Amino acid sequence: MSETYEILAVKYGAMMNRTRADNFVHPDDHAAPMPIDYFVFVLRNKNRTILIDTGFDHKEAAPRGRKIDLEPREALQRIGIDAENLDTCIVTHLHYDHAGTLHHFPKARFHLQEAEMAYATGRCMCDHAMRHPFTLDHVCQMVKNVYSGRVQFHDGDGEVAPGVTVHHMPGHSKGIQAIRVMTDHGPVMLASDVVHFYENIERRMPFFISVDIEATLRSYDRLEQMAGGLKNVIPGHDPLILKRYPAWKPETAGTVHKLDAPRIG
């Protein structure tokens, strides 16, 4: 029997000094500002709590020229989630900003596409341009998790829990996956970096990091179809998320917003 979930977007940082040239393969206005937000996402109901991605920490932020307000585990603590006791985490892909604090979740079982592990440890990583979004320590930590029996691999579509399924949607990375979540208002597709910004999918303008642009565009089509329309697709990094969905509580406006609620913008 399916279950429904509350979905929370938890913002822990942002990069303000980005332009459209940083966010699209073929930008229409190279110099126009276009900030990016960093989120982790939480699914929960009375039976379980599931984390989507683990974000990155201050140690990773500094050499990459990023700045975060607080580490993901600290942001989660503010909404009553103890990183050390969380038992389920979906890792959408292994880029540094999505798999950077795996070690902060010592009891978690991680759900990952087999294709992503193969990509992150295979011959493509011989080329700097391909491995740049990855960090060696993060990939090695996931390998350690495999050896300790804490990784559930998926090959295409798979169920994580009743009402929560993962779906391989390559393009940005070879093994990236999106998550379909049932809510009281119907299905929601959490796109992660399959779609960074609403504009990527609305205008069919892929993000500038893509191992396969054609695959990215086909993944856009599949996301829209599985969501029942673009209004139910949530991108992974768009500041507009915080304008289109209500705050979880009045005091969390701008940091924690409720994505299972009807859109307000």
Image (cartoon, rainbow, N blue to C red):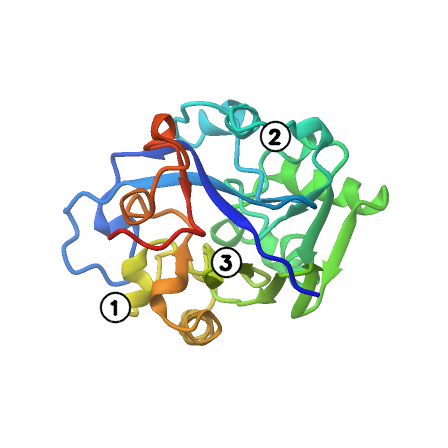
Instruction: Point out the tag, 3 or 2, that comes first from the N-terminus.
Output: 2
**Residue shown at 61%/46% (left/top)?**
45
> 238 or 20: which is nearer to us?
238
Q: Which residue is mark 2?
A: 81
Q: Residue 44's x, y, as percent?
A: 60, 45
The answer to whether residue 132 shows anywhere in this view is no
| Residue 73: mark in rendering | none
Q: Nearer the viewer, mark 2 or mark 1?
A: 2
Amino acid on which the number 1 mark rests in the picture: Arg
- Mark 3, residue position: 184
**What amino acid type should be assigned to the residue bearing mark 3?**
Asp
Answer yes or no: do the residues labelled 3 and 2 have beta carbons within 8 Å?
no
Amino acid on which the number 2 mark rests in the picture = Ile
**Circle 3: element type:** loop
Q: Position of residue 181 (x, y in %)?
A: 55, 59
Q: Going 45% across and 55% down the picture, which residue do you hit? A: 193
Look at the numbered disc 2 and give the secondary structure of its residue: loop
Instruction: Say few, some or many: other residues with alpha carbon within 10 Å of mark 2 (under 14 / 14 to 19 / 20 or more).
Output: some
Q: Quadrant of residue 253?
A: top left
Q: Secondary structure at mark 1?
A: loop
Q: Which residue is drawn at the image coordinates 51% and 49% (left, top)?
A: 128
Quarter of image, res 64: top left
Q: Is residue 110 left or right of residue 124?
A: right
Give the x, y percent position of residue 131: 54, 49
Number of the front mark, 1 or 3: 3
Q: Upstream in the sequence, badge 2 or badge 1? A: 2
For the residues labelled 1 and 3, the Cα–Cα distance comes to: 29 Å
| Residue closest to the eye, 85 or 151 | 85
Taking 106 as reference, is 91 above or below it?
Answer: below
Q: Which residue is mark 1?
A: 203
Q: Is residue 124 at least partly visible in the picture?
A: yes
Tell me the distance, in whole angstroms, between the alpha carbons under discs 2 and 1. Answer: 36 Å
